[in-house]
Image (tube, rainbow, N blue to C red):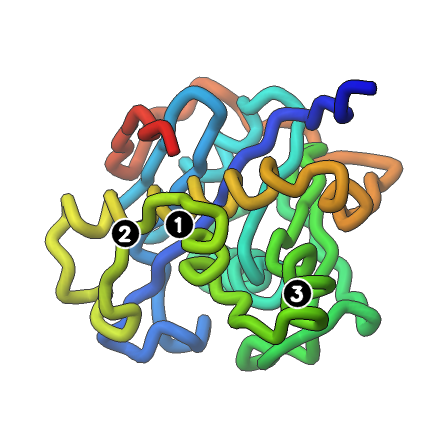
């Protein structure tokens, strides 16, 4: 029997301003966001309010699928929600704290990890999939780069504490790579990963209006074949 075909999987990754530490949404802004779609990678950069507004617009226009992050239940999703509130930018991202989810280190200002949905896209934290068996049985690192190397996937490595020193081209390549790796890691383990997808809530926010002009810089990259 053929393995089940996954829904569209969209890798999602953010980069934060490491000049201000990069780990506390009360102090560090988001400087780039990447969405890895099946046929292309989209990276948004620029002023944070416009970047977040354009991200919400982008997510609303994607065919219904699963947003895949790496440790996003504890970091990326609540970070996005916190920064949007501080910027006064509306995101149709709904989060629900789930004490049953494992949390390495809670995001400052938060108690743990979250289930999420964004315009009907369910969320998968692929880190949880690999932590569930790889870490438990093999006692290996479950960092995104370590897992990518085990899977034979190409990575883009930088000093994560000095992201603010990257050129714009380097930043775009780095955040796109991490979004693509999260997507590929979920695809590689889909039959096992599927049960880890967050539940589908009963109602979804209405799609964002589509006539607003972009406020961020949008970069489109064709993903390389692993």
Q: Dot 3 surroundings within 10 Å: few (below 14), some, or many (20 or more)?
A: some
Q: In the figure, residue 176 lies in which quadrant?
A: top left
| Residue 135 shown left or right of residue 201 in the figure | left
Q: Name the residue under label 2.
A: 156
Q: Earlier in the sequence, mark 3 or mark 1?
A: 3
Q: Which residue is drawn at 42% across and 46% down?
A: 152
Q: Which residue is drawn at 44% across and 77% down?
A: 24
Q: Dot 2 surroundings within 10 Å: few (below 14), some, or many (20 or more)?
A: few
| Residue 169 shown left or right of residue 54 in the figure | left
Q: In the figure, residue 26 lies in which quadrant?
A: bottom left
Q: Residue at x 55, y 50 (%)?
A: 69
Q: Earlier in the sequence, mark 1 or mark 2?
A: 2
- Residue 134 x %, y %: 65, 63
In whole angstroms, how far apart are the C-alphas of marks 2 and 3?
22 Å
- Residue 188 x %, y %: 59, 39
- Quadrant where the N terminus lies? top right
- Residue 201 x %, y %: 84, 41
Q: Residue 204 carries which label?
A: none
126 is higher (above) or lower (below) than 83: above
Q: Residue 178 carries which label?
A: 1
The kind of secondary structure element at disc 2 is: loop
In whole angstroms, how far apart are the C-alphas of marks 1 and 2?
8 Å
Which one is nearer the viewer's eye here, 179 or 62?
A: 179
The kind of secondary structure element at disc 1 is: helix
- Quadrant where the C terminus lies? top left
- Residue 123 x %, y %: 67, 45
Q: In the figure, residue 104 lies in which quadrant?
A: bottom right
Circles 1 and 2, Cβ within 8 Å, touching? The answer is: yes
In whole angstroms, how far apart are the C-alphas of marks 3 and 1?
18 Å
| Residue 177 shown left or right of residue 76 in the figure | left
Which one is nearer the viewer's eye here, 138 or 41?
A: 138
Q: Name the residue under label 3.
A: 131
């Amino acid at each position: 029997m053929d393995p089940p075909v996954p829904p569209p999987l969209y890798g999602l990754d953010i980069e934060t301003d490491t000049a201000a530490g990069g780990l506390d949404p009360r102090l560090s802004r988001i400087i780039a966001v990447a969405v890895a779609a099946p046929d292309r990678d989209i990276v948004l950069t620029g002023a944070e309010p416009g970047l977040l507004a354009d991200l919400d617009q982008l997510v609303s226009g994607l065919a219904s699928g699963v947003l895949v992050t790496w440790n996003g239940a504890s970091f990326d999703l609540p970070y996005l929600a916190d920064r949007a509130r501080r910027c006064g930018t509306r995101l149709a991202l709904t989060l629900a704290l789930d004490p049953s989810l494992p949390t390495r280190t809670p995001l400052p200002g938060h108690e743990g990890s979250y289930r999420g949905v964004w315009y009907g896209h369910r969320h998968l934290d692929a880190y949880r999939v690999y932590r569930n068996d790889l870490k438990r049985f093999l006692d290996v690192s479950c960092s995104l780069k370590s897992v990518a190397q085990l899977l034979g996937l190409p990575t883009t490595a930088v000093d994560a504490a000095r992201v603010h020193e990257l050129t714009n081209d380097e930043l775009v390549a780095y955040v796109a790579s991490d979004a693509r790796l999260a997507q590929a890691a979920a695809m590689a383990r889909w039959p096992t990963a599927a049960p880890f997808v967050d539940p589908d809530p009963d109602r979804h926010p209405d799609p964002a209006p589509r006539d607003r002009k972009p406020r961020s810089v949008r970069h489109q990259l064709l993903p390389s074949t692993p």
